[in-house]
Image (cartoon, rainbow, N blue to C red):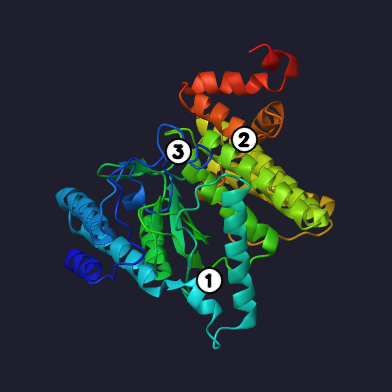
């Protein structure tokens, strides 16, 4: 499989390659990625590398360097056995297939065989990119200039697992990138097979589809068929969010990273929809966001109850019955929540299967700091360059210092004294 990857890279045409100038180029500070690293958590541990690539003269050399990193990783994996080697081969093969399906959007827009519906969505992506670059100061680079029709419902599938009476996730560790609380697959069949294997070992298992993911800049991410047909608001939200991750990433602080990206996403949508006089769409987005927060708070409430139950010294059958009753209570509360939402059924799929611990850990508190970031944005008088600079300063601090500083923006008078 590694030979296939290198062969693919060697035969890849040199597209858009520019020779580096002898003089150092001065970048617009608004477009320069900031923070200690510009890394994004993704489903694929192979792509979670935070090393900086050297800017080579030729694109092929960049790709070959990537292949060298992959070879180093695979060399380490051989120490853990054939099963791990097969898994890494699967990841490489899946990524290559997506790259091979990537077609330039500009060419597709001129292709008479492409449907007008798809053309409209692809043109929308290009418009969103331009807005992100010019109005939001986000580093678009060569992201989302291509389209890949995957001909499946999801780009990938994540597998989560926990013991029967614990919310501590099973983790998978990899060379260089460390450990993750899930295992990603490009093949639904492979993900399901692995899920069944874990179930036979007694784990609670949950398998969830992923519509979009990032390769952290190692490749130019294309627009995928799994999300291209979203509404114009959701499509813009996704692109603003993912590009924000490339601007700022703080290692080992998921809540900070996701909250920052969500704040940029919300401000980006507010500005973008204002230019289109479509404030009603912004209202719909805000309603959807509030529902998401309500859903997460509800799940977190029952996670705490389950943790308390598992900490008790009870017979196995008693604990199992109490666990089932708690999940029944979660379903009942969701039905009440749907009534408040006037029948909105966006989370029905999540409740369509038997609930378990693994499913609970797949929901995270990614939005805890969004309101603080929005207040910080207000404090900078909605100047994005100043906002990004303040966030850069936060990124240099410890996790505890970041929380304390963000909390001060909840009190405008205290924030003004700093």
Mark 2 or mark 3, earlier in chain: 3
Q: Which residue is mark 1?
A: 225
As rendered, which of 18 and 152 lies closer to the eye? 18
What quarter of the picture does the N terminus occupy? Answer: bottom left
Where residue 10 appears, as percent x and y from the top left, is 20, 68
CA neighbours of label 3 inside 10 A, class few (<14), some (14 to 19), many (20+):
some
Whether residue 350 is visible, yes or no, is no
CA neighbours of label 2 inside 10 A, class few (<14), some (14 to 19), many (20+):
few
Mark 1 or mark 2, earlier in chain: 1
**For the view shown, which residue lies furthest in the top direction?**
417
SS at mark 1? loop
Where residue 341 appears, as percent x and y from the top left, is 81, 53
As rendered, which of 369 and 341 lies closer to the eye? 369
What quarter of the picture does the C terminus occupy? Answer: top right
Distance CA(mark 3)–CA(mark 1): 34 Å
Residue 19, compared with residue 330, is above or below; it is: below
Q: Which residue is mark 3?
A: 168
SS at mark 3? loop
Q: Is residue 144 left or right of residue 177?
A: right
Q: Residue at x 51, y 78 (%)?
A: 108
Q: Residue at x 25, y 44 (%)?
A: 175
Distance CA(mark 1)–CA(mark 2): 39 Å
Q: Which residue is mark 2?
A: 305
SS at mark 2? helix
């Amino acid at each position: 499989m590694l030979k296939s990857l290198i062969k693919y890279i060697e035969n890849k045409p040199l597209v858009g390659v520019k020779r580096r100038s002898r003089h150092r180029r001065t970048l617009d500070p608004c477009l320069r990625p900031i923070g200690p690293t510009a890394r994004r958590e993704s489903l694929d541990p192979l792509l979670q590398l935070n090393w900086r690539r050297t800017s080579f003269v030729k694109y092929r050399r960049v790709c070959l360097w990537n292949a060298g990193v992959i070879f180093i990783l695979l060399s380490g994996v051989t120490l853990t056995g054939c099963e791990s080697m097969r898994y890494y081969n699967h990841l490489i093969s899946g990524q290559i297939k997506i790259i091979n399906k990537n077609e330039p959007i500009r060419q597709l827009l001129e292709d008479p065989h492409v449907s007008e519906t798809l053309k409209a969505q692809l043109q929308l992506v290009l418009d969103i990119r331009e807005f992100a670059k010019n109005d939001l100061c986000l580093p678009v680079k060569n992201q989302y200039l291509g389209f890949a029709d995957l001909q499946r419902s999801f780009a990938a599938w994540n597998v989560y697992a926990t013991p029967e009476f614990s919310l501590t996730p099973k983790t998978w560790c990899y060379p260089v990138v460390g450990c993750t609380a899930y295992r990603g697959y490009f093949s639904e069949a492979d993900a399901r097979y692995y899920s069944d294997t874990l179930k036979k070992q007694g784990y609670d298992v949950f398998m969830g589809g992923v519509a979009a993911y990032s390769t952290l800049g190692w490749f130019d991410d294309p627009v995928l068929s799994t999300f291209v047909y979203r509404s114009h608001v959701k499509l813009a939200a996704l692109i603003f969010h993912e590009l924000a991750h490339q601007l700022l990433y703080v290692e080992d602080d998921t809540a900070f990273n996701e909250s920052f990206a969500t704040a940029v996403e919300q401000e980006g949508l507010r500005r973008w929809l204002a230019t289109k006089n479509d404030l009603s769409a912004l209202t719909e987005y805000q309603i959807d966001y509030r529902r998401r927060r309500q859903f997460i708070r509800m799940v977190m409430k029952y996670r705490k109850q389950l943790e308390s139950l598992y900490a008790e010294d009870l017979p196995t059958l008693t604990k199992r019955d109490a666990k089932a009753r708690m999940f029944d209570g979660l379903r009942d509360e969701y039905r009440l929540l749907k009534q408040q939402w006037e029948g909105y059924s966006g989370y029905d799929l999540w409740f369509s299967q038997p609930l378990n611990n693994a499913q609970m850990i797949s929901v995270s508190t990614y939005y805890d700091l969004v309101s603080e970031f929005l207040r910080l944005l207000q404090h900078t008088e909605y100047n994005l360059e100043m906002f990004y600079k303040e966030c850069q300063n936060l990124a240099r601090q410890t996790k505890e210092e970041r929380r304390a500083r963000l909390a001060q923006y909840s009190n405008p008078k205290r924030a003004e004294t700093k």
